[in-house]
Amino acid sequence: MSVLLHISASTRGDASHSRRIGRQLVDELQRRHGGPLRVIARDLAAQPPAYPDRSFVEAALMPQAQRGATQAEALALSEELIAELEGADALVIDTPMHNFTVPAVLKAWIDQVVRIGRTFVSSREGKEGLLQDRPVFLVVACGGAVPEPPTPSGQIDFLTPYLRYVLGTIGLRNVSALRLTSLARGAGEIAQADAHAAEWIAAAAAGWAGQDRHRKI
């Protein structure tokens, strides 16, 4: 059975555009999937990951052979979240943009799963991810406009390139991103974003289904 890990970061519940579109994406991935698909939902707003404290940092930097029960406890949540990643065949992250980048709860999740010696190592060639690559689908909701190229009146998206970079650090490089903008500017912009999302979701789900069938041949 294939596993899809679905991570949501918005605190706005049913009012969240990123959650709404993320659910549509998950539903379509399930519909298009050629076999049983188990969805593991990780709601970061309902259960915010702990911010790394001193005990976490010291345990993470300590050689594994030297860790005892105290260090294992400090890293328990990190190991749980990493295990979810390792066991997933694909990943959906839906998130709003907060102050041009990731919400605090999503950054806390990242700090729990991006660990030297566990999900990446450093070498002379740079950082090398230790996780097997798999498809990652990002749904990013922005209240304001994010013009390309940037303009003085528009905001800059630091969220999407950051997520691509940090996920690539641990080995997840197959990242597809849907960015919905101007969602705080009225019903017309929301309708336009929804239409764009519907097209993107159909293509993304069809592409994943095709890759999955190819792997099974």
Image (cartoon, rainbow, N blue to C red):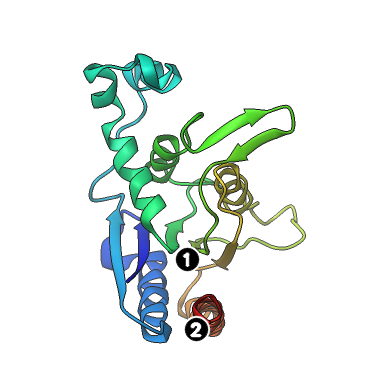
The residue nearer to you, when weighing 205 against 145, is 205
The reply to whether residue 181 is visible in this rendering is no
Q: Which circle's residue, 1 or 2, is located before the other in the chain?
A: 1
Label 1 close to label 2 by CB (< 8 Å):
no
Q: Quadrant of residue 145?
A: bottom right
Instruction: Report the side of 125 relative to 120 (left or right).
Output: right
Label drawn at residue 53: none
Is the N terminus in the top left, top right, bottom left or bottom right quadrant?
A: bottom left
Dot 1 amino acid type: Ala
Say if 110 sits above or below 69 in the image: below
The location of residue 34, given as percent across then percent down, is 40, 84
The location of residue 165, given as percent across then percent down, is 62, 46
Q: Could you tell me which residue is drawn at 46 percent across and 34 percent down?
A: 118
The reply to whether residue 39 is visible in this rendering is yes
Query: What is the secondary structure assignment of the residue under circle 1?
Result: loop
The location of residue 93, given as percent across then percent down, is 44, 59
Instruction: Report the side of 195 relative to 7 (left or right).
Output: right
Dot 2 amino acid type: Ala
Specify the farthest residue to the front: 217
Measure the C-alpha gap from mark 1 to mark 2.
Answer: 19 Å
The residue nearer to you, when weighing 39 against 111, is 39
Q: Could you tell me which residue is drawn at 41 percent across and 23 percent down?
A: 60
The location of residue 50, given as percent across then percent down, is 30, 33
Instruction: Report the side of 13 relative to 142 (left or right).
Output: left
The residue nearer to you, when weighing 215 against 10, is 215
Q: Which residue is mark 1?
A: 184
Q: Which residue is mark 2?
A: 198
Q: Could you tell me which residue is drawn at 58 percent across and 65 percent down?
A: 176
Q: Nearer the viewer, mark 1 or mark 2?
A: 2
Crowding near the residue tagged with mark 1, few <14, some 14–19, many ≥20 C-alpha atoms within 10 Å: few
